[in-house]
Image (cartoon, grey):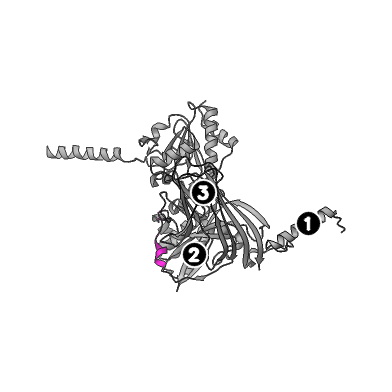
Amino acid sequence: MNIHLSRREFIAGSLLFAGHLLAGGRLSFAEPVDDSEVEAVELKIRYVTEIQKPPKRKGIRIWIPLPVNDPGQEITDLSLESRLPYRITEDPVYGNRMAYMETERVEGGERFVMSFRIKRKAVGVVQDDTDPSRDLKPSEWERWDKGITEFVDRLVGDESDPVKIGRMLYDAIIDRMNYIHEVCGRGVSTITFEERLGRCDEFHALFRTMMMYRGIPVRWEQGMSLPYPSEIKETGEFEADCINARSWARFHIGEGRWMPVDLSEAKRRPHLRDYYFGRLVPNRMRFSTGRGLTLNPPQKGIINTFAYTYIEAGGIPVIYGHNYRNVINYGLVRIEK
Amino acid sequence: MNGLRRLVTGVIVVCFVFLAFPVFAGVSVKEGMPVPTFTMLDETGNYVDLAGLIDRPTIIYFTHNACWYCEQIIRQLKRAEAKFGKEKLKIIGVNVMAKDTELIKAYKEELGFTFLMLAGNRDDVLSAFKINYVPVLVFVDSSKTVRKVVGHYIHDPQLEENIRNILDD
Protein backbone atom coordinates (compact mmCIF):
# COMPACT_ATOMS: atom_id res chain seq x y z
CA MET A 1 0.00 0.00 0.00
CA ASN A 2 1.42 3.37 -0.96
CA ILE A 3 0.58 6.38 1.15
CA HIS A 4 1.38 9.81 -0.17
CA LEU A 5 1.51 12.66 2.31
CA SER A 6 2.09 16.28 1.56
CA ARG A 7 4.77 18.03 3.57
CA ARG A 8 2.06 19.90 5.49
CA GLU A 9 0.19 16.66 6.28
CA PHE A 10 3.43 14.99 7.37
CA ILE A 11 4.35 17.83 9.77
CA ALA A 12 0.82 18.07 11.16
CA GLY A 13 0.69 14.33 11.70
CA SER A 14 4.11 14.29 13.37
CA LEU A 15 3.13 17.09 15.74
CA LEU A 16 -0.11 15.37 16.68
CA PHE A 17 1.70 12.09 17.30
CA ALA A 18 4.43 13.73 19.41
CA GLY A 19 1.79 15.64 21.39
CA HIS A 20 -0.10 12.46 22.07
CA LEU A 21 3.04 10.70 23.38
CA LEU A 22 4.06 13.71 25.48
CA ALA A 23 0.59 13.72 27.01
CA GLY A 24 1.17 10.17 28.19
CA GLY A 25 -0.67 8.51 25.36
CA ARG A 26 0.11 5.04 24.13
CA LEU A 27 0.30 3.41 20.77
CA SER A 28 -2.89 1.64 19.88
CA PHE A 29 -3.13 -0.96 17.18
CA ALA A 30 -6.84 -1.56 17.70
CA GLU A 31 -6.31 -5.10 18.90
CA PRO A 32 -9.50 -6.63 20.25
CA VAL A 33 -9.87 -6.37 24.01
CA ASP A 34 -11.59 -8.96 26.17
CA ASP A 35 -13.08 -7.03 29.11
CA SER A 36 -12.72 -9.99 31.45
CA GLU A 37 -8.95 -10.10 30.86
CA VAL A 38 -8.22 -6.43 31.48
CA GLU A 39 -6.35 -5.85 34.75
CA ALA A 40 -6.40 -2.07 34.81
CA VAL A 41 -7.26 1.03 32.83
CA GLU A 42 -5.39 4.28 33.32
CA LEU A 43 -7.02 7.56 32.36
CA LYS A 44 -6.57 11.28 32.67
CA ILE A 45 -9.81 12.87 33.84
CA ARG A 46 -11.05 16.42 33.61
CA TYR A 47 -14.30 16.93 35.52
CA VAL A 48 -15.94 20.32 34.97
CA THR A 49 -18.89 21.70 36.88
CA GLU A 50 -20.23 24.75 35.06
CA ILE A 51 -22.97 27.14 36.11
CA GLN A 52 -25.50 27.55 33.29
CA LYS A 53 -28.24 29.86 34.58
CA PRO A 54 -27.38 31.35 37.95
CA PRO A 55 -29.93 30.23 40.56
CA LYS A 56 -32.42 32.98 41.42
CA ARG A 57 -32.07 32.38 45.13
CA LYS A 58 -29.07 33.64 47.04
CA GLY A 59 -26.83 31.61 49.33
CA ILE A 60 -25.02 29.19 47.02
CA ARG A 61 -23.39 26.08 48.50
CA ILE A 62 -21.45 23.62 46.36
CA TRP A 63 -20.23 20.11 47.19
CA ILE A 64 -17.98 18.37 44.63
CA PRO A 65 -17.24 14.69 45.36
CA LEU A 66 -13.57 13.76 45.25
CA PRO A 67 -12.51 10.42 43.79
CA VAL A 68 -11.49 7.81 46.29
CA ASN A 69 -8.18 6.00 46.74
CA ASP A 70 -8.97 2.40 47.55
CA PRO A 71 -7.84 -1.10 46.51
CA GLY A 72 -9.85 -0.66 43.30
CA GLN A 73 -8.38 2.63 42.14
CA GLU A 74 -5.32 4.83 42.50
CA ILE A 75 -5.86 8.56 42.20
CA THR A 76 -2.89 10.82 41.51
CA ASP A 77 -2.29 14.42 40.42
CA LEU A 78 -5.61 15.56 41.86
CA SER A 79 -6.20 19.30 41.51
CA LEU A 80 -9.16 21.67 41.64
CA GLU A 81 -9.37 25.06 39.95
CA SER A 82 -11.94 27.40 41.41
CA ARG A 83 -12.36 31.15 41.67
CA LEU A 84 -14.05 30.55 44.99
CA PRO A 85 -12.05 29.47 48.00
CA TYR A 86 -12.81 25.90 48.96
CA ARG A 87 -12.07 23.44 51.69
CA ILE A 88 -11.79 19.68 51.64
CA THR A 89 -14.19 17.98 54.04
CA GLU A 90 -15.25 14.44 54.94
CA ASP A 91 -18.67 13.15 55.83
CA PRO A 92 -18.69 11.87 59.40
CA VAL A 93 -20.24 8.46 58.72
CA TYR A 94 -18.57 7.08 55.60
CA GLY A 95 -15.56 9.36 55.29
CA ASN A 96 -16.54 10.45 51.76
CA ARG A 97 -14.34 13.36 50.73
CA MET A 98 -15.59 16.47 48.98
CA ALA A 99 -14.59 19.99 48.05
CA TYR A 100 -16.98 22.49 49.61
CA MET A 101 -17.43 26.14 48.69
CA GLU A 102 -20.02 28.79 49.37
CA THR A 103 -20.85 32.23 48.05
CA GLU A 104 -23.78 34.60 47.92
CA ARG A 105 -24.23 34.35 44.14
CA VAL A 106 -22.61 32.69 41.15
CA GLU A 107 -22.46 33.94 37.59
CA GLY A 108 -23.33 31.99 34.48
CA GLY A 109 -20.19 30.42 33.03
CA GLU A 110 -18.51 30.02 36.42
CA ARG A 111 -16.45 26.82 36.30
CA PHE A 112 -14.97 24.42 38.80
CA VAL A 113 -12.42 22.17 37.15
CA MET A 114 -11.16 19.02 38.83
CA SER A 115 -8.34 17.10 37.17
CA PHE A 116 -6.80 13.80 38.18
CA ARG A 117 -5.26 10.65 36.91
CA ILE A 118 -6.93 7.34 37.75
CA LYS A 119 -5.69 3.79 37.55
CA ARG A 120 -8.85 1.72 37.85
CA LYS A 121 -8.23 -1.98 38.54
CA ALA A 122 -10.21 -5.16 37.97
CA VAL A 123 -10.67 -5.52 41.69
CA GLY A 124 -12.01 -8.62 43.42
CA VAL A 125 -12.36 -9.51 47.11
CA VAL A 126 -10.70 -6.91 49.32
CA GLN A 127 -9.68 -6.87 52.96
CA ASP A 128 -11.24 -4.11 55.07
CA ASP A 129 -11.37 -4.55 58.82
CA THR A 130 -13.67 -1.62 59.58
CA ASP A 131 -16.77 -2.53 61.56
CA PRO A 132 -19.29 -4.07 59.13
CA SER A 133 -22.32 -3.34 61.35
CA ARG A 134 -22.72 0.07 59.67
CA ASP A 135 -23.52 -1.78 56.46
CA LEU A 136 -26.39 -3.63 58.05
CA LYS A 137 -28.46 -0.49 58.41
CA PRO A 138 -30.87 -0.08 55.51
CA SER A 139 -31.38 3.38 54.08
CA GLU A 140 -34.89 4.82 53.88
CA TRP A 141 -35.18 3.29 50.39
CA GLU A 142 -34.19 -0.23 51.38
CA ARG A 143 -36.96 -1.53 53.57
CA TRP A 144 -38.15 -5.09 53.26
CA ASP A 145 -41.79 -6.07 53.17
CA LYS A 146 -43.57 -9.42 53.37
CA GLY A 147 -43.13 -10.06 49.66
CA ILE A 148 -39.37 -9.62 49.88
CA THR A 149 -38.87 -11.61 53.08
CA GLU A 150 -40.99 -14.54 51.85
CA PHE A 151 -39.09 -14.55 48.56
CA VAL A 152 -35.71 -14.59 50.31
CA ASP A 153 -36.69 -17.21 52.86
CA ARG A 154 -38.10 -19.48 50.18
CA LEU A 155 -34.98 -19.11 48.04
CA VAL A 156 -32.28 -19.24 50.68
CA GLY A 157 -33.81 -21.66 53.18
CA ASP A 158 -31.37 -22.63 55.92
CA GLU A 159 -28.22 -21.66 54.02
CA SER A 160 -25.85 -19.59 56.13
CA ASP A 161 -22.76 -19.24 53.92
CA PRO A 162 -22.76 -15.59 52.79
CA VAL A 163 -21.14 -16.40 49.43
CA LYS A 164 -23.76 -19.05 48.63
CA ILE A 165 -26.59 -16.77 49.78
CA GLY A 166 -25.08 -13.93 47.76
CA ARG A 167 -24.95 -16.04 44.62
CA MET A 168 -28.53 -17.28 45.04
CA LEU A 169 -29.86 -13.75 45.43
CA TYR A 170 -27.58 -12.39 42.68
CA ASP A 171 -28.96 -14.94 40.19
CA ALA A 172 -32.55 -14.58 41.35
CA ILE A 173 -32.54 -10.79 41.05
CA ILE A 174 -30.86 -10.83 37.63
CA ASP A 175 -33.40 -13.39 36.40
CA ARG A 176 -36.33 -11.50 37.90
CA MET A 177 -35.44 -7.98 36.76
CA ASN A 178 -35.49 -6.10 33.48
CA TYR A 179 -33.00 -3.33 32.77
CA ILE A 180 -34.25 0.12 31.80
CA HIS A 181 -32.05 2.77 30.19
CA GLU A 182 -31.82 6.50 30.72
CA VAL A 183 -33.91 7.17 33.77
CA CYS A 184 -32.86 8.58 37.13
CA GLY A 185 -33.48 5.81 39.63
CA ARG A 186 -34.61 6.16 43.23
CA GLY A 187 -33.57 2.63 44.18
CA VAL A 188 -36.61 1.73 46.28
CA SER A 189 -36.50 -1.98 47.09
CA THR A 190 -40.20 -2.64 47.57
CA ILE A 191 -41.19 -1.00 44.28
CA THR A 192 -38.27 -2.68 42.49
CA PHE A 193 -39.34 -6.09 43.78
CA GLU A 194 -42.90 -5.53 42.62
CA GLU A 195 -42.18 -3.85 39.29
CA ARG A 196 -39.12 -5.97 38.34
CA LEU A 197 -37.60 -3.03 36.53
CA GLY A 198 -34.72 -0.64 37.02
CA ARG A 199 -31.15 0.49 36.54
CA CYS A 200 -28.12 -0.08 38.76
CA ASP A 201 -29.63 1.62 41.83
CA GLU A 202 -32.73 -0.55 41.71
CA PHE A 203 -30.78 -3.80 41.23
CA HIS A 204 -28.38 -3.02 44.05
CA ALA A 205 -30.98 -1.65 46.43
CA LEU A 206 -32.88 -4.91 46.13
CA PHE A 207 -29.73 -7.01 46.54
CA ARG A 208 -28.65 -4.99 49.54
CA THR A 209 -32.10 -5.21 51.11
CA MET A 210 -32.34 -8.98 50.71
CA MET A 211 -28.82 -9.58 52.01
CA MET A 212 -29.28 -7.26 54.99
CA TYR A 213 -32.53 -9.02 55.82
CA ARG A 214 -30.45 -12.20 56.15
CA GLY A 215 -27.95 -10.39 58.35
CA ILE A 216 -25.18 -9.98 55.75
CA PRO A 217 -23.60 -6.51 55.62
CA VAL A 218 -23.55 -4.93 52.16
CA ARG A 219 -21.68 -1.76 51.28
CA TRP A 220 -23.07 0.59 48.64
CA GLU A 221 -20.36 1.95 46.33
CA GLN A 222 -21.11 4.86 44.05
CA GLY A 223 -19.41 6.56 41.17
CA MET A 224 -19.55 7.31 37.49
CA SER A 225 -19.56 4.95 34.54
CA LEU A 226 -16.63 4.71 32.17
CA PRO A 227 -16.74 2.94 28.81
CA TYR A 228 -15.86 -0.76 28.75
CA PRO A 229 -12.16 -1.31 27.92
CA SER A 230 -13.26 -3.08 24.73
CA GLU A 231 -15.17 0.04 23.64
CA ILE A 232 -13.14 2.89 25.08
CA LYS A 233 -11.71 5.47 22.69
CA GLU A 234 -8.51 7.47 23.04
CA THR A 235 -10.55 10.42 24.28
CA GLY A 236 -14.18 10.89 25.19
CA GLU A 237 -16.72 13.11 26.91
CA PHE A 238 -19.85 12.41 28.87
CA GLU A 239 -22.25 14.02 31.30
CA ALA A 240 -21.66 13.41 35.00
CA ASP A 241 -25.32 13.21 35.98
CA CYS A 242 -27.84 10.72 37.27
CA ILE A 243 -28.01 8.96 33.91
CA ASN A 244 -24.30 8.11 33.92
CA ALA A 245 -23.98 7.60 37.65
CA ARG A 246 -23.20 4.02 38.55
CA SER A 247 -23.61 1.99 41.73
CA TRP A 248 -22.41 -1.45 42.68
CA ALA A 249 -22.19 -3.36 45.94
CA ARG A 250 -19.71 -5.24 48.10
CA PHE A 251 -20.85 -7.78 50.68
CA HIS A 252 -19.12 -9.12 53.75
CA ILE A 253 -18.00 -12.73 53.48
CA GLY A 254 -16.34 -12.92 56.88
CA GLU A 255 -12.99 -12.06 58.48
CA GLY A 256 -12.92 -8.57 57.04
CA ARG A 257 -13.26 -9.71 53.43
CA TRP A 258 -15.67 -7.98 51.05
CA MET A 259 -16.80 -9.40 47.71
CA PRO A 260 -17.93 -7.07 44.91
CA VAL A 261 -20.98 -7.62 42.72
CA ASP A 262 -22.49 -5.68 39.85
CA LEU A 263 -25.92 -7.11 39.12
CA SER A 264 -27.13 -4.58 36.58
CA GLU A 265 -24.03 -4.93 34.41
CA ALA A 266 -24.34 -8.71 34.69
CA LYS A 267 -27.89 -8.31 33.41
CA ARG A 268 -26.77 -6.13 30.51
CA ARG A 269 -23.77 -8.33 29.61
CA PRO A 270 -24.82 -11.94 30.22
CA HIS A 271 -21.40 -13.27 29.19
CA LEU A 272 -19.95 -11.45 32.22
CA ARG A 273 -22.49 -12.83 34.70
CA ASP A 274 -20.01 -15.11 36.48
CA TYR A 275 -17.29 -12.47 36.29
CA TYR A 276 -19.41 -9.82 38.01
CA PHE A 277 -19.98 -12.08 40.99
CA GLY A 278 -16.71 -11.33 42.72
CA ARG A 279 -14.92 -8.98 40.32
CA LEU A 280 -15.48 -5.60 38.70
CA VAL A 281 -14.50 -4.56 35.20
CA PRO A 282 -12.42 -1.34 35.42
CA ASN A 283 -15.11 0.71 33.72
CA ARG A 284 -16.05 2.96 36.62
CA MET A 285 -14.71 5.55 39.04
CA ARG A 286 -15.69 5.53 42.69
CA PHE A 287 -16.65 8.80 44.34
CA SER A 288 -18.50 7.74 47.47
CA THR A 289 -19.87 5.03 49.74
CA GLY A 290 -23.36 4.73 51.20
CA ARG A 291 -26.83 6.10 50.60
CA GLY A 292 -28.86 8.77 52.35
CA LEU A 293 -25.72 10.76 53.01
CA THR A 294 -25.18 13.80 55.15
CA LEU A 295 -22.48 15.88 53.52
CA ASN A 296 -19.99 18.08 55.34
CA PRO A 297 -21.13 20.72 56.05
CA PRO A 298 -24.63 19.22 56.08
CA GLN A 299 -26.87 19.92 53.13
CA LYS A 300 -30.55 20.85 53.49
CA GLY A 301 -31.89 18.53 50.80
CA ILE A 302 -32.01 14.73 50.79
CA ILE A 303 -29.11 13.03 49.04
CA ASN A 304 -29.86 9.52 47.85
CA THR A 305 -26.32 8.95 46.53
CA PHE A 306 -23.32 11.21 45.91
CA ALA A 307 -21.74 10.62 42.52
CA TYR A 308 -21.55 14.13 41.12
CA THR A 309 -21.62 17.78 42.15
CA TYR A 310 -24.50 18.83 44.35
CA ILE A 311 -25.51 22.50 44.65
CA GLU A 312 -28.06 24.30 46.81
CA ALA A 313 -29.33 27.87 46.57
CA GLY A 314 -31.07 29.21 49.65
CA GLY A 315 -31.16 25.68 51.04
CA ILE A 316 -32.94 24.27 47.97
CA PRO A 317 -31.29 21.82 45.52
CA VAL A 318 -30.73 23.63 42.22
CA ILE A 319 -31.83 22.06 38.95
CA TYR A 320 -29.43 19.89 37.00
CA GLY A 321 -29.27 20.79 33.31
CA HIS A 322 -30.85 24.17 33.97
CA ASN A 323 -28.69 25.80 36.63
CA TYR A 324 -25.57 23.70 36.15
CA ARG A 325 -23.98 20.76 34.39
CA ASN A 326 -21.04 18.44 34.99
CA VAL A 327 -18.99 17.20 32.07
CA ILE A 328 -16.22 14.60 32.24
CA ASN A 329 -13.50 14.46 29.60
CA TYR A 330 -11.15 11.52 29.62
CA GLY A 331 -7.95 10.67 27.83
CA LEU A 332 -6.90 7.04 27.73
CA VAL A 333 -3.35 6.50 28.95
CA ARG A 334 -3.14 2.71 28.86
CA ILE A 335 -4.97 -0.55 29.20
CA GLU A 336 -3.19 -3.28 31.15
CA LYS A 337 -3.90 -6.92 30.46
CA MET B 1 -76.34 9.34 77.12
CA ASN B 2 -72.62 8.89 77.91
CA GLY B 3 -72.40 6.22 75.21
CA LEU B 4 -73.90 8.58 72.64
CA ARG B 5 -71.46 11.31 73.68
CA ARG B 6 -68.51 8.93 73.30
CA LEU B 7 -69.80 7.86 69.89
CA VAL B 8 -70.11 11.46 68.69
CA THR B 9 -66.66 12.29 70.09
CA GLY B 10 -65.22 9.25 68.32
CA VAL B 11 -66.79 10.25 65.00
CA ILE B 12 -65.41 13.79 65.37
CA VAL B 13 -61.91 12.46 66.15
CA VAL B 14 -61.98 10.10 63.13
CA CYS B 15 -63.22 12.94 60.88
CA PHE B 16 -60.47 15.22 62.22
CA VAL B 17 -57.79 12.60 61.53
CA PHE B 18 -59.01 12.10 57.98
CA LEU B 19 -59.27 15.83 57.28
CA ALA B 20 -56.01 16.81 58.92
CA PHE B 21 -53.77 14.31 57.17
CA PRO B 22 -53.23 13.42 53.53
CA VAL B 23 -55.66 10.80 52.36
CA PHE B 24 -54.93 7.95 49.96
CA ALA B 25 -57.76 6.41 47.99
CA GLY B 26 -56.04 3.02 48.12
CA VAL B 27 -55.34 1.96 44.53
CA SER B 28 -52.15 1.63 42.52
CA VAL B 29 -51.58 3.14 39.11
CA LYS B 30 -52.58 0.87 36.25
CA GLU B 31 -53.59 1.60 32.69
CA GLY B 32 -57.36 1.24 32.27
CA MET B 33 -57.98 1.73 35.98
CA PRO B 34 -58.99 4.80 38.03
CA VAL B 35 -56.08 7.06 38.87
CA PRO B 36 -54.85 6.91 42.49
CA THR B 37 -55.86 10.08 44.29
CA PHE B 38 -54.54 11.86 47.33
CA THR B 39 -54.71 15.13 49.13
CA MET B 40 -51.33 16.72 48.53
CA LEU B 41 -49.43 19.84 49.49
CA ASP B 42 -49.27 22.54 46.83
CA GLU B 43 -46.91 25.48 46.45
CA THR B 44 -49.12 27.77 48.53
CA GLY B 45 -49.00 25.46 51.52
CA ASN B 46 -52.55 24.15 51.09
CA TYR B 47 -53.58 20.53 50.80
CA VAL B 48 -55.44 19.96 47.55
CA ASP B 49 -57.48 16.97 46.47
CA LEU B 50 -56.00 15.34 43.37
CA ALA B 51 -59.38 13.75 42.57
CA GLY B 52 -60.99 17.19 42.44
CA LEU B 53 -58.17 18.65 40.37
CA ILE B 54 -58.59 16.09 37.59
CA ASP B 55 -61.64 17.76 36.08
CA ARG B 56 -60.49 17.40 32.46
CA PRO B 57 -57.87 15.36 30.56
CA THR B 58 -54.75 15.55 32.69
CA ILE B 59 -51.06 14.72 32.63
CA ILE B 60 -49.56 13.98 36.02
CA TYR B 61 -45.84 14.47 35.64
CA PHE B 62 -43.35 13.08 38.18
CA THR B 63 -39.97 14.80 38.20
CA HIS B 64 -37.13 15.98 40.43
CA ASN B 65 -34.29 18.50 40.48
CA ALA B 66 -31.39 16.20 39.56
CA CYS B 67 -32.73 14.95 36.24
CA TRP B 68 -31.83 16.75 33.03
CA TYR B 69 -34.33 14.84 30.90
CA CYS B 70 -37.03 15.85 33.35
CA GLU B 71 -36.22 19.52 32.92
CA GLN B 72 -36.47 19.09 29.14
CA ILE B 73 -39.90 17.49 29.55
CA ILE B 74 -41.07 20.55 31.53
CA ARG B 75 -40.32 22.61 28.41
CA GLN B 76 -42.30 20.16 26.29
CA LEU B 77 -45.23 20.30 28.69
CA LYS B 78 -45.20 24.10 28.57
CA ARG B 79 -45.42 23.91 24.79
CA ALA B 80 -48.18 21.29 24.94
CA GLU B 81 -50.18 23.37 27.39
CA ALA B 82 -49.93 26.37 25.05
CA LYS B 83 -50.83 24.29 22.01
CA PHE B 84 -53.82 22.39 23.37
CA GLY B 85 -55.05 25.05 25.80
CA LYS B 86 -55.53 24.98 29.55
CA GLU B 87 -59.27 24.51 29.16
CA LYS B 88 -58.74 21.20 27.35
CA LEU B 89 -55.65 19.84 29.04
CA LYS B 90 -54.51 20.07 32.63
CA ILE B 91 -50.93 19.44 33.70
CA ILE B 92 -50.05 18.64 37.28
CA GLY B 93 -46.41 18.34 38.22
CA VAL B 94 -45.29 16.25 41.18
CA ASN B 95 -41.77 16.87 42.46
CA VAL B 96 -40.64 13.67 44.15
CA MET B 97 -37.85 15.48 46.04
CA ALA B 98 -40.24 17.96 47.61
CA LYS B 99 -41.48 17.47 51.14
CA ASP B 100 -42.60 21.07 51.52
CA THR B 101 -43.64 24.12 49.52
CA GLU B 102 -40.24 25.81 49.29
CA LEU B 103 -38.69 23.34 46.88
CA ILE B 104 -41.62 23.40 44.47
CA LYS B 105 -41.83 27.18 44.62
CA ALA B 106 -38.15 27.44 43.75
CA TYR B 107 -38.50 24.82 40.99
CA LYS B 108 -41.35 26.77 39.38
CA GLU B 109 -39.50 30.08 39.72
CA GLU B 110 -36.46 28.65 37.99
CA LEU B 111 -38.24 26.93 35.13
CA GLY B 112 -40.97 29.53 34.70
CA PHE B 113 -44.09 27.42 34.27
CA THR B 114 -47.54 28.14 35.60
CA PHE B 115 -49.16 24.75 35.96
CA LEU B 116 -49.69 23.33 39.40
CA MET B 117 -46.91 21.44 41.14
CA LEU B 118 -47.34 19.30 44.24
CA ALA B 119 -44.90 18.04 46.87
CA GLY B 120 -44.47 14.36 46.08
CA ASN B 121 -41.82 13.07 48.45
CA ARG B 122 -44.29 10.80 50.20
CA ASP B 123 -44.18 7.02 50.45
CA ASP B 124 -47.91 6.61 49.89
CA VAL B 125 -47.94 8.67 46.69
CA LEU B 126 -44.73 7.19 45.30
CA SER B 127 -45.82 3.64 46.11
CA ALA B 128 -49.26 4.07 44.57
CA PHE B 129 -47.81 5.55 41.37
CA LYS B 130 -44.86 3.09 41.55
CA ILE B 131 -42.35 5.87 41.09
CA ASN B 132 -38.96 4.18 41.30
CA TYR B 133 -37.36 6.56 38.84
CA VAL B 134 -38.10 9.74 36.92
CA PRO B 135 -39.33 10.96 34.50
CA VAL B 136 -42.79 9.38 34.63
CA LEU B 137 -45.85 10.77 32.86
CA VAL B 138 -49.34 9.51 33.69
CA PHE B 139 -51.99 10.33 31.08
CA VAL B 140 -55.48 10.46 32.61
CA ASP B 141 -58.73 11.05 30.71
CA SER B 142 -61.64 13.15 31.94
CA SER B 143 -63.29 10.12 33.56
CA LYS B 144 -60.18 9.87 35.79
CA THR B 145 -59.05 6.68 34.08
CA VAL B 146 -55.34 6.12 33.49
CA ARG B 147 -54.85 5.69 29.76
CA LYS B 148 -51.06 5.51 29.59
CA VAL B 149 -48.02 5.52 31.87
CA VAL B 150 -44.75 6.56 30.20
CA GLY B 151 -41.67 5.89 32.34
CA HIS B 152 -38.89 7.40 30.26
CA TYR B 153 -37.96 10.44 28.19
CA ILE B 154 -40.62 11.30 25.65
CA HIS B 155 -40.34 13.08 22.30
CA ASP B 156 -42.86 15.69 21.16
CA PRO B 157 -44.72 13.45 18.64
CA GLN B 158 -45.16 10.71 21.24
CA LEU B 159 -46.26 13.27 23.83
CA GLU B 160 -48.84 14.73 21.46
CA GLU B 161 -50.12 11.29 20.49
CA ASN B 162 -50.72 10.43 24.12
CA ILE B 163 -52.39 13.78 24.73
CA ARG B 164 -54.74 13.27 21.76
CA ASN B 165 -55.67 9.87 23.20
CA ILE B 166 -56.97 11.43 26.41
CA LEU B 167 -58.60 14.53 24.94
CA ASP B 168 -62.38 14.67 24.85
CA ASP B 169 -63.88 14.63 21.35
Circle nearer the N terminus (2, 3): 3
**Quick check: is A138 in the magenta stretch?**
yes
Q: Which residue is mark 2?
A: A250
How far apart, in angstroms, are the residues tagged by discs 2 and 1? 46 Å
Nearer the observer, A214 or B100: B100
Identify the disc placed on residue A13: 1
Nearer the observer, B96 or B162: B96
Circle nearer the N terminus (2, 1): 1
Q: Which residue is mark 3?
A: A184
Q: Is residue B45 left or right of residue B149?
A: left
- The N terminus of chain B, quarter of image: top left
Q: Are marks 3 and 1 in contact (CB under 8 Å)?
A: no
**Quick check: is A293 in the magenta stretch?**
no
The x and y percentages for residue B103 are 42, 42
Looking at the rendered structure, the secondary structure element under dot 1 is: helix
Identify the disc placed on residue A163: none
In the rendered image, which quarter is residue B43 located in?
Answer: top left
The type of residue carrying mark 3 is: Cys
Q: Is residue A288 left or right of residue A5?
A: left
The type of residue carrying mark 2 is: Arg
Part of the protein shown in magenta: A132-143
Chain letter of disc 1? Answer: A
Mark 3 burial class by Cα count in 10 Å: few <14, some 14-19, many 20+: many
The x and y percentages for residue A127 are 49, 72
Nearer the observer, A195 or A221: A221
Q: Are marks 2 and 1 in contact (CB under 8 Å)?
A: no
Q: Does residue A117 show up?
A: yes
Residues at marks 3 and 1, common chain?
yes
Mark 2 burial class by Cα count in 10 Å: few <14, some 14-19, many 20+: many
